[in-house]
Amino acid sequence: MTLTDKTVLVTGATGFLGGAVARRLAGEGARVRALVRRPGRDRYIRDVPGIELVAGDITDPDRMKTVAQGCDYVFHVAAATGGTLDYQRKLNVDGTRYVMLAAAAARVQRVVHVSTIAVYGYGYAGDITEDIPHQPGRVPYNITKSQAEAVVRDIGAHHNVPYSIIRPGMIYGPRSGMWTRTMFNLSKRKPTIFIGDGSGSVPCIYVDDVVDLMLTLAVHPAAAGEAFNCVSDPAPTWRDFLGGYARLAGHQSWLALPALPLKLVAPLVELILVLRGEPQAVPALLPYIQACKTCTMDKARRLLGWQPQVCLDEGLRRCEPWLREEGLLP
C-alpha cells in the first residue's frame, strides 16, 4: 500500500522535518496540503508540484477541521521546541488535540504523530526501548511531548482515529538548524571543544530515514496504535558525530574539557533557566551526554522489517553541499 493519489495533510510543513516530509510525499504522487502558519517561511515547498499551501494554525480548532476535510492521512509534525511550559503546552498539547479531533471529523485512515525520544527523560541507564515509562522531568518540551502522546492515544481510542507515533532522536541533515548548522559551527573550530573525550552516545538520525519511517508508519498494518523509536542503532559517539563535521572542515583536533567544573556550575545555570520559566535539567544533561546508551530499533525491525539505511558517514557527506550553499564551507 502506498500514499500515491492520497490527500495528505502535513502540519509544520515549513519546518525542517515537515518540509522534507511534504516534498517526499509529493514526489511519490500524494496530494499534499501543507499547513503554513507564517507566510514567507514556505520557500522550500513553494511551487513544488503536488503541494498545496494552506494557511492555518494547529491551535485554531475550527480551522483545523476545515483544513483536514477530505484528507486521507495526517502527518502531525508541528511543535514548539522552546519557550515556557504554558507556551509549549498550547502548541504541543492543545494543538495536538485539535489536530486529532480534526482527523476524527475527517475520518482519516491514519495519523502519524511526531514525538521525540526526549519523552524518556535523561535518567535512564543502558538501552532504551519503547515500552519503558516516560520520565520527562520538568523540561517543558519533554513534558508537553509526553502529554501530547497521551492526547493522541486518548482521542485515538475514544474517536476511533487510527494513529502511529514516531519518536525520533536528534535529526540532522541539510536544512537542520541545531544538529547540522550549529553542530558544524561547533565542530569546525580548531580544536573542537567538548565535555570529555566524546565517548558518550549521541542518539542521532538522518532526516531521510525519519521521513522513510513516517511513510512506513502511515500504511503498515502492524504500526497501528504503536510507538516507534527512530535513531541510529547502535548509536555513534559524540566524537564520531562531531569529528565527522570536523573532517568536513579539514581538521581532527579535539579539546576535552573536564566535566567536574561544569558539574559545579550546572545547578546555577539551571536556576537561571528555571527563573526564566524554561528549565532544561542541565545537571542531568551533563552525565547524559557522557553515557553510553542506545534507543533500540528492535521493535521497528521486528514488526515492520524496517531499520535506518543512512550511516553516519553517508549522512554527513550528504550535508556537505548544503553547508557550502550556506557559506559555512569554502
Image (cartoon, rainbow, N blue to C red):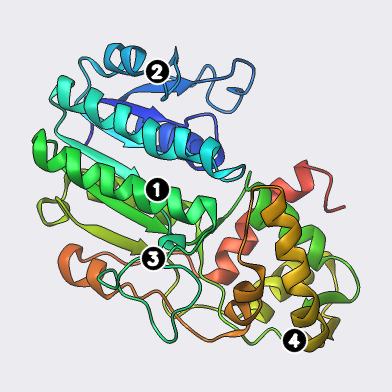
Going 71% across and 52% down the picture, which residue do you hit?
A: 275
Q: Secondary structure at mark 4?
A: loop
- Tell which circle, 2 or 1, labels the residue nearer the N-terminal end: 2
Q: Is residue 140 left or right of residue 62?
A: right
Mark nearer the viewer, 4 or 1: 4
Separation of residues labelled 4 and 1 (CA atoms): 33 Å
Classify 10 Å Cα crowding around label 2: few (below 14), some (14-19), many (20 and above): few
The residue that mark 4 highlights is 196
Residue 182: horizontal and vertical position, in percent? 74, 55
Separation of residues labelled 3 and 4 (CA atoms): 28 Å
The residue that mark 3 highlights is 308
Residue 24: horizontal and vertical position, in percent? 40, 37
In-front residue for pair 277/222: 277
Asked if 304 appears above or below 26 in the picture, the reply is below
Q: Quadrant of the N terminus?
A: top left
Contact, mark 3 vs mark 4 (Cβ under 8 Å)? no
Separation of residues labelled 2 and 3 (CA atoms): 35 Å
Q: Amino acid at mark 1?
A: Val
In-front residue for pair 299/276: 276
Asked if 258 appears above or below 138 in the picture, the reply is below
Residue 60 circle label: 2
Q: Is residue 146 visible?
A: yes
Asked if 135 appears above or below 71 in the picture, the reply is below
- Tell which circle, 4 or 2, labels the residue nearer the N-terminal end: 2
